[in-house]
Image (cartoon, rainbow, N blue to C red):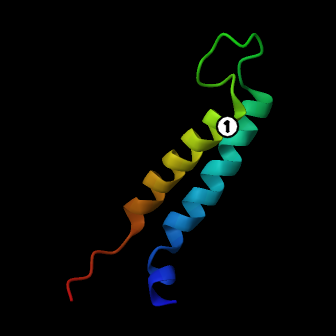
């Protein structure tokens, strides 16, 4: 449980990134299908999750034990 609390911002970033990637694909994504990144919903969700996880990991405290 202690580790989960330490990585709470990473988990929140993962969830928000996944939802954000889906919403970006749904409302802004490429309609013609010629855009390799935004035309596929799965790629956009994975990209959003990676971006959210990366941004969430900025807030991890570095404790020297």
Residue that mark 1 sits on: 42
Return the x and y of residue 9 as percentages of the image width and height.
51, 68
The number of numbered badges drawn on the structure is 1
Return the x and y of residue 20 as percentages of the image width and height.
67, 45
Question: Is residue 36 found left or right of 51 in the rendered image?
Answer: right
Q: Residues within 10 Å of mark 1 (few under 14, many from 20)?
A: some
Question: Is residue 42 found left or right of 7 in the rendered image?
Answer: right
Q: Which residue appears at 79% of the width and 30% of the height?
A: 27
Examine the rendered structure and indicate whether residue 58 appears above or below residue 52: below
Looking at the rendering, which quadrant does residue 32 occupy? top right
Examine the rendered structure and indicate whether residue 42 appears above or below residue 64: above
Q: Which residue appears at 50% of the width and 46% of the height?
A: 51
| Quadrant (top left, top right, bottom left, bottom right) of the C terminus | bottom left
Return the x and y of residue 62 as percentages of the image width and height.
27, 75
Question: Is residue 27 found left or right of 56 in the rendered image?
Answer: right
Helix, strand or loop for disc 1: helix
Examine the rendered structure and indicate whether residue 4 appears above or below residue 23: below
Name the residue nearer the viewer: 8 or 40. Answer: 40
Return the x and y of residue 33 as percentages of the image width and height.
72, 13
Q: Residue furthest left?
A: 64
Q: Which residue appears at 77% of the width and 15% of the height?
A: 31
Looking at the rendering, which quadrant does residue 13 occupy? bottom right
Q: Which residue appears at 59% of the width and 24% of the height?
A: 37
């Amino acid at each position: 449980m202690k580790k989960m609390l330490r990585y709470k911002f990473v988990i929140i970033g993962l969830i928000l990134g996944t939802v954000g990637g889906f919403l970006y694909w749904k409302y802004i994504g490429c309609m013609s299908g010629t855009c390799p990144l935004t035309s596929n919903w799965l790629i956009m969700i994975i990209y959003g999750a990676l971006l959210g996880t990366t941004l969430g990991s900025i807030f991890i405290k570095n404790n020297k034990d």
